[in-house]
Image (tube, grey):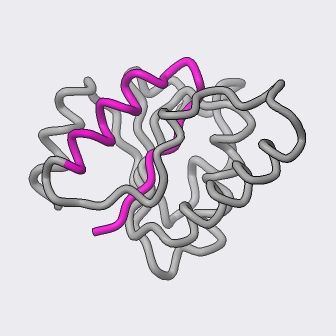
Amino acid sequence: MRFYVASGLENREIAADMIHFLANKGHIPTYDWTENGDVRGQGLDRLLATSVSEASAVRDAELVLVLLPGGYGTHTELGIALATRSNKRIILWSATGKEFEDGPNTCVFYHHQSIDKITSTFEELKAYLNTIL
């Protein structure tokens, strides 16, 4: 299965861990943004190329796994995933679940019917993925 892991730059290490975890299970990453990190400040051409690569990767993935918290890019990727949801499963993960509560830490799109919300430890998330993939 083709997959994409979206998350904020502050979660780069756990995103890379998850990408390697899924790849080691035989799944194919559509793009690994963790290899590049933050591309801001690397010029407009680099920003353009990265935006096209990441948008295509989300569109083409059969699984989009969003690791919260996320930044602007993460939320844009979630929007692309929702807009192209007919060919994919979307899982939104939070270690605390605070983002899923009705209040200032949530986003209306976290509650879309096409999203599976998971609150667990990172290791429990991996165990869950083992059971569904």
Among the 4 quarters of the image, the one containing residue 17: top left
Q: Is residue 37 above or below residue 60?
A: above
The overriding secondary structure of the stretch rendered in magenta is helix
The image quadrant where one finds the N terminus is bottom left
Q: Residue at x 62, y 33 (%)?
A: 102
Residue 85: percent from left, percent from top: 53, 73
Compared across the picture, whether 79 is left or right of 115 comes to right
Residue 26: percent from left, percent from top: 16, 59
Please provide the residue range marked out in magenta: 1-23
Residue sitting nearer the eye, 60 or 47: 47
Q: Is residue 133 above or below residue 6?
A: below
- Count up the numbered dots: 0
Residue 32: percent from left, percent from top: 46, 45
Residue 3 belongs to magenta span = yes
Q: Residue at x 54, y 62 (%)?
A: 57
Residue furthest out toward the bottom: 86
Residue 19: percent from left, percent from top: 33, 42
The image quadrant where one finds the C terminus is bottom left
Q: Is residue 130 above or below residue 123?
A: below
Q: Residue at x 82, y 51 (%)?
A: 48
Q: Residue at x 62, y 54 (%)?
A: 54
Among the 4 quarters of the image, the one containing residue 95: top left
Compared across the picture, whether 57 is left or right of 89 comes to right
Among the 4 quarters of the image, the one containing residue 104: top right
Residue sitting nearer the eye, 22 or 40: 40
Compared across the picture, whether 125 is left or right of 52 comes to left
